[in-house]
Amino acid sequence: MAKPRELRRRIKSVQSTRKITKTMELVATSKLKRAQDRVVAARPYATALAEVIGDLYAPELAERFPLLRQPARDGHGRRVALVVITANRGLCGAFNANLIREARRRIEQLEAEGTGVDLHLIGKKGITYFKFAKRAAASQRTDVGDKPKAEHAAEIVGPLMSQFEAGALDAVEVVFAQFKSAVSTPPTTLRILPITPPRADGRTGGRADAVQSQTASPADRPSAAFYILKPSADAILEQLLPLYVRNQLYRALVETAAAFLGAQRTAMKNATDNAGEIIELLQRTYNRARQAQITQELAEIVGGAEALKG
């Protein structure tokens, strides 16, 4: 059994750790509310953009708008830009590991199809991992943090749109944490380029359904034929399509930021609870050790007294 002095040191150490984890839990909880507000605020705008593009879309537009150009079915010779969003910090359980695992799965799947992959990394954890794995990255950023802005999304996706329009890329995909709730943040792969055209039922098709909001069916919403479009549908789409792509990446950034804070809050709460259990166990052990020490001292005193009498 450990000595009482050593047990006291361990109890103080765990108590200090519990104070830190409790503080981090409270900070994450405070930040999570604002992050959730950003996620909720981004959804109506994305829904409105999807509805307008769905109303204006026609199959022949793919010939005039490069962002609508669909890739060839054969994966050989194609090139895909994969944007992987992770956090800059840890202490959030398996959050970053799950995102990296999803990115690796998608990379292996694309390369098995004969598709080249350009890796674009956002967040220190992803950068550190792929550097360790000796996987070259086309670009990397660590300045987005917990408060993504629309400007960040524009700076990241702008060059990718230019490469896609020039034909250097066949698709752009994003690996991020889809924020469903504070405890449900599954890693998700979303294709943001080319823009997936609406299906016959008025909903967007393909993998974009992972995070895109539902749009009304043609029977429930007015047709574009009833709109007065100025200057023209083509001019409107020319402005809306890049805006839509930037918004998709912005939503991925804000959802990942909110998911990270939710994961950190959960991890710190579990750490705080575990620290409390350890302190309780150490306190009981200390009490038993202290009781044994006192009993031994009393026995020695009684034994000494008896020896003096004899």
Image: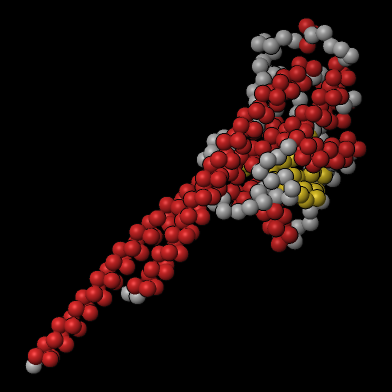
The residue that appears at 29% across and 71% down in the rendered structure is 289
In the figure, is residue 250 to the left or right of 22? right
Of 65 and 122, nearer the camera is 122
In the figure, is residue 154 to the left or right of 87? right
The residue that appears at 60% across and 54% down in the rendered structure is 90
Of 11 and 66, nearer the camera is 11
Viewport quadrant of the N terminus: bottom left
**Residue 74 visible:** no
- As drawn, 233 above or below 65: above
* x, y percent for residue 228: 82, 8
In the figure, is residue 67 to the left or right of 265? right
The residue that appears at 88% across and 19% down in the rendered structure is 234
Quadrant of residue 215 within the rendered picture: top right
Viewport quadrant of the C terminus: bottom left
Q: Residue furthest top?
A: 226
The residue that appears at 54% across and 39% down in the rendered structure is 182
Q: How many marks?
A: 0
- As drawn, 176 above or below 233: below
Q: Residue furthest left?
A: 310
**Residue 99 visible:** yes
